[in-house]
Image (cartoon, helix red, strand yellow):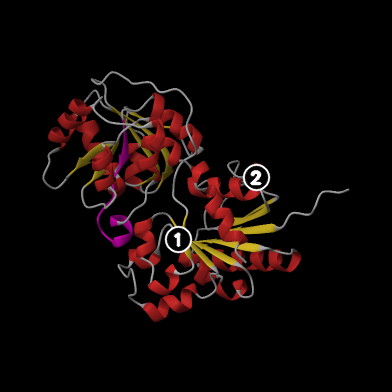
């Protein structure tokens, strides 16, 4: 008897399929569904290709009119040519851009970089606008309980949490000489999001080094990547970043400018990378999750407004070896422990 035909999930993003959360989600969805990925990029992404039946990348710069037009065209062709069981849409911005094409489909909206929080309009503010924006979404998923409470009340009724946990790390861990401080600066690399801090560390401590991995977002970090004590490794799979954290780094940089509610309420995977790899984070006061870092004793909370870079360096060096990393916490805060919630969102038709 031939195998039963698997239903198809259409995954919509303006990323090229290399984002760590996207890769985890696509891998999980592929365990139960056929996955068609439609994103924006210059070339096929090796990060997700092995999990997808088809990867369609529109060339262009995300959210530009011509790119949107081309993504519309690609989406029309997919919907006309295939029977789609469910559509996964990353963030409200993309939902709005393709809004009419989503009608009469089962839609799961994945909000992990909310435009409303960037505009400081969380909760029930702009309620009528949000009712229109969220109307096509049958299910909404967010990254933690705090972000759930920042949705409008009417949207919370159809929302669930799929945490931004990394895969369970079971590789080696190695600690380096504390006199040669090594920072891991990974993810979206921008000067306001840790780049300025890293540059100050390198200038203040001639024994300090930085390993950079991810997307070079601005000219400042492009220049920083050329520093003689910086090692830029490119855009890497999360598994490789975890290995670097566990075997080469003393701290993971996790800093956010407090310019909007989206940053203040950030839900960074780096917190849980720290738990998995037993490598502490450096996070700034004002970011709500910094309280968790302090409570769990898994990193250093810095106040860049009142502490000098020399004071921070002294704390970083004195604190090494004093952090607490629990194996049970790593087990319960891994992607494997929550991925079923993602599958449930798509199955709840």
Q: What percent of the width, then of the height, locates residue 310?
A: 14, 33
Left or right? Give the position of 147 relative to 77.
left
For residue 28, above or below residue 61 = above
Q: Residues within 10 Å of mark 1 (few under 14, many from 20)?
A: some
| Mark positioned earlier in the residue sequence (1 or 2) | 2
Relative to 342, is 174 on the left or the right? Answer: left
Residue 9 rendering spot, x and y as whole percentages: 65, 58
The magenta-colored residue range is: 251-264
Considering only vertical position in the picture, is 151 above or below 312?
Answer: below
* Number of other residues with Cα within 10 Å of mark 2, as a class: few under 14, some 14 to 19, many 20 or more: many
Q: Quadrant of residue 220?
A: top left
Quarter of the rendering containing residue 318? top left
The quadrant holding residue 49 is top right
Q: Is residue 234 visible?
A: yes
Q: Residue at x 43, y 57 (%)?
A: 112
- Tally the marks: 2
Q: Nearer the viewer, residue 116 or 77?
A: 116
Is residue 177 on the magenta stretch? no
Q: In this rendering, would 128 be left or right of 228?
A: right
Name the residue rendered at 17%, 35% in the picture.
312
Q: Which structural element holds mark 1?
A: loop
Does the magenta-highlighted stretch encompass residue 256? Answer: yes
* Distance between the alpha carbons at the discs numbered 1 and 2: 22 Å
Q: Which residue is mark 2?
A: 51
Give the number of the disc on residue 111. 1
Q: Position of residue 341 (x, y in %)?
A: 53, 53
**227 over 115 or under it: above or below:** above
Q: Which residue, as the protein is rendered here, is positioned at the far front? A: 328
């Amino acid at each position: 008897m031939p195998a039963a035909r698997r239903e198809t999930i259409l995954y919509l993003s303006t990323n090229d399929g290399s984002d760590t959360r996207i890769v985890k989600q696509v891998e999980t969805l592929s365990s139960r569904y056929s996955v068609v990925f439609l994103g924006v990029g210059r070339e096929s992404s090796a990060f997700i290709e092995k999990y997808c039946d088809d990867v369609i990348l529109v060339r262009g710069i995300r959210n530009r009119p011509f790119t949107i037009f081309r993504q519309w065209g690609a989406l029309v062709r997919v919907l006309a040519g295939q029977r789609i069981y469910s559509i996964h849409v990353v963030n409200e911005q993309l939902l709005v851009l393709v809004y009419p094409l989503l009608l009469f489909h089962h839609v799961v909206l994945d909000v992990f970089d909310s435009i409303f929080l960037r505009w400081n309009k969380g909760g029930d503010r702009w309620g009528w606008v949000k009712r229109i924006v969220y109307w096509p979404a049958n299910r909404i998923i967010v990254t933690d309980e705090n972000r759930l409470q920042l949705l409008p009340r009417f949207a919370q009724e159809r929302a669930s949490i799929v945490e931004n946990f990394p895969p369970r790390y079971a590789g080696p861990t190695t600690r380096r000489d504390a006199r040669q401080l090594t920072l891991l600066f990974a993810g979206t690399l921008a000067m306001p999001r840790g780049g300025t801090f890293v540059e100050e560390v390198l200038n203040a401590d001639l024994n300090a080094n930085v390993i950079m991995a991810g997307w070079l977002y601005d000219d400042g970090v492009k220049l920083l990547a050329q520093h003689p004590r910086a090692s830029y490794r490119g855009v890497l799979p999360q598994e490789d970043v975890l290995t670097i954290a566990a075997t080469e780094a003393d701290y993971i940089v996790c800093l956010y400018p407090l310019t909007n509610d989206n940053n203040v309420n950030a839900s960074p995977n780096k917190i849980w990378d720290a738990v998995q790899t037993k490598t502490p984070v450096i996070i700034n006061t004002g970011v709500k999750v910094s309280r968790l870092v302090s409570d769990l004793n898994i990193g250093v909370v810095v106040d860049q407004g009142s502490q000098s870079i020399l004071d921070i360096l002294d704390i970083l060096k004195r604190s090494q070896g004093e952090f607490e990393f629990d194996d049970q916490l790593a087990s319960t805060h891994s992607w494997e422990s929550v991925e079923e919630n993602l599958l449930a969102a798509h199955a709840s038709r």
